[in-house]
Image (cartoon, rainbow, N blue to C red):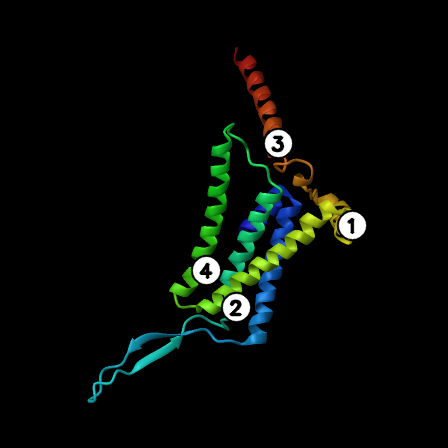
Amino acid sequence: MPAYASLAVQTREYVVIVMWAGQFACEALSWLIKRAVKENRPAGSVGVCCENRFHAHVHIFQRIGNGYGFPSSHSQYMGYFATFLICHLYFQHKFGTTGYTLLDFTWRVLVYFAICSWALLVAYSRYALGYHNAHQILWGFGIGVFFAIMLFVASQILPRRQPSSIFGKLKIFLLANPVSTWFQIRDGWDVWADGGREHEWLRWRKEWDSKRRRHDKKQS
């Protein structure tokens, strides 16, 4: 969550703020489901009592973690995060080009693979550490993926393809109202294919070169 806050404050990007708000909503959904289903976490063996005279082992079982186990919150978090980010990169963002099609394609595949691997490793860690069983993890991850797709379609795809729809009008309101204007909220990807990254870099480079030239003139 701190990373979301930092990006939102620094970039003022609509898509970052929507993704952040969706993450909160997804967490709230997980909280509600947990208390509606009330499924316990798996029991894990944490110790063995000494043998009795019949050589029978007495195991002590304890549930790892606090609260209910269905669905896995960490898995749901990462399912949402990875899915929304990949949708954004695939449908909205234009990667910089190296001039070589194969190299550009390989780079994009590596980015998607890294995001998916990160999400799946976090989900698997919940099983390996004994906090959740496979059923709780798969459902949590699936809920996160579904929630991310629904939010991305409603907040990004439909407003672009159907600007006169309720989703398009809502987006315009969220960007054009006085509060958003005061905070300078923008949707860079609605104007530039790379969100304005290259445009901002060129503007910075121009000012930086100009500053260096002025400095060199003073030194000469």
* Comes first in the chain, label 2 or label 1: 2
Whether residues under marks 4 and 2 lie with C-beta atoms below 8 angstroms apart, the answer is: no
- Where does label 2 land, which residue? 71
Position of 167 relative to 218 (above/below) = below
**Dots 2, 1 in contact, CB < 8 A:** no
Q: In terms of sequence position, does the residue under pointer 3 or pointer 2 come before the other?
A: 2
Amino acid on which disc 3 is placed:
Glu
172 sits left or right of 195 in the view: right
* N-terminal-most mark, 4 or 1: 4
Q: Dot 1, how many residues are within 10 Å of its Cα: few (below 14), some (14-19), or many (20+)? A: some
Residue found at the very far top of the displayed protein? 220
Residue 203 placed where, x, y %? 62, 27
In screen coordinates, is 128 left or right of 181? left
Q: Quadrant of the N terminus?
A: bottom right
Instruction: Kindly identify which numbered label has been placed on residue 123.
Output: 4
Q: Is residue 47 left or right of residue 199?
A: left
Q: CA distance from mark 4 to mark 1?
A: 37 Å
Q: Which residue is mark 1?
A: 169
